[in-house]
Amino acid sequence: MNEAYAHLIVSRQGRVGIAQLNRPQALNALNSELMSELVHALQTLDADEGIGCIVVTGSEKAFAAGADIKQMADATVVDMMGSPFLGYWDAVQRIAKPVVAAVSGYCLGGGCELAMLCDLIVAAETAQFGQPEINLGVIPGAGGTQRLTRAVGKSVAMDMILTGRRISAQEALGFGLVSRVFPASSFLEDSLALAAEIAAKAPVALRMAKESVNRAFESSLAEGILFERCAFNLLFSTEDQKEGMAAFVEKRKPSWQGK
Ligand code: CAA
């Protein structure tokens, strides 16, 4: 994989695609160029049949320190309304394959909002999460007030968003914002191993599973259950369902075809 990106390094390890934010001089602050490149890279990996799971990561020091404050500082309301900037976050949500946010260091503001758009967040023990926009005279603008509240509940979300305080990886684990915390020394390796484990599963079932879990945030319980039921039943039209269940009965490992 050899796209010419200015602020992003894209690579692959087996069936795992890796998009690494690479704007070290600004702690990976998310400007328009970086977000546009990220969306392009994610869409390219999503369309690649050889990829089963995507990892979005940053550097050891920063996943991303937020949207680029310098780029926004002089904007007017009309500039903001006319800008495609926040739409890039929406595009991340439309990626069909599982996306893991592997977070080390600062994960703040739009960086935390980007991580929450991924399907799960794993963190190095050194990671720090926060929505510090209140300290800039604004509020989270890329979904933070909604997704953080759904992830950690009202009281913790209010505490973080009204004070702008940062929480540690261990706190984030306790609040359910992240699913696993890895030692700093093996963080990337551990994150990629998790992504490889996911990437080795049946591809169509992975998509259905992701879409079904996401329904929980977009619909009533009854509608979500109905969506799940239809997706579950639909999977019985795939070769992978036949293979998966036959392999169980025959006490062997399944071999997935993705169809
Ligand atoms: N935007 C633009 N530049 C940023 C940035 C950001 N969000 N975060 C850091 N940088 C830049 C700094 O300006 C600095 O650049 P210079 O060397 O040119 O001065 C460089 O990155 C290194 O940063 P610091 O010197 O500040 O590093 P530090 O280790 O002392 O502090 C930090 C690290 C606590 C993360 C601090 O940089 C910080 O507070 N950053 C801003 C965090 C923030 O407020 N994020 C929210 C942004 S608004 C948003 O995201 C809106 C939204 O919801 C979409």
Image (cartoon, grey):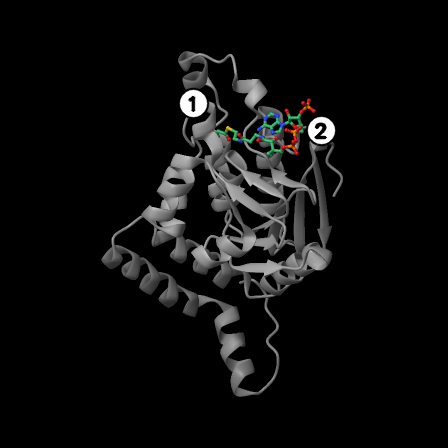
Nearest the viewer among 183 and 11 is: 183
Answer with mark 1 or mark 2, whichever residue precedes in sequence: 2
Location of residue 242 in the rendering, given as x and y in whole percent from the top left corner: 49, 75
**Label 2 CB, ligand 1: below 8 Å?**
yes
Front residue (pair 221, 122): 122
Is residue 108 in sight in this rendering? yes
Marks 1/2: CA–CA distance:
24 Å
Q: Nearer the viewer, residue 26 or 191?
A: 26
Q: Is mark 1 within 8 Å of ligand 1?
A: no
Amino acid at pointer 2: Gln
In the rendered image, residue 156, in percent from the top left (x then y), is placed at 38, 47
Q: Is residue 190 left or right of residue 111?
A: right
Q: Position of residue 116 (x, y in %)?
A: 48, 45
Q: Quadrant of the N terminus?
A: top right
Tell me which image quadrant ligand 1 sits in: top right
- Asked whether the beta carbons under mark 1 and mark 2 sit within 8 Å of each other, the answer is no
* Camera-nearest label, 1 or 2: 1
Q: Amino acid at mark 1?
A: Gly
Residue bearing the label numbered 1 = 137
Total marks shown come to: 2
Using the rendered view, name the quadrant where residue 35 is placed.
top right
Q: Residues within 10 Å of mark 2 (few under 14, many from 20)?
A: few
Query: With respect to residue 51, does 200 lie above or below?
Result: below
SS state under label 2 = helix
Residue drawn at point x = 41 percent, y = 18 percent: 81
Q: Badge 1: few (under 14), some or many (20 or more) residues near its Cα, within 10 Å?
A: few
**Residue at x 52% of width, y 75% of height:** 244
Label for residue 25? 2
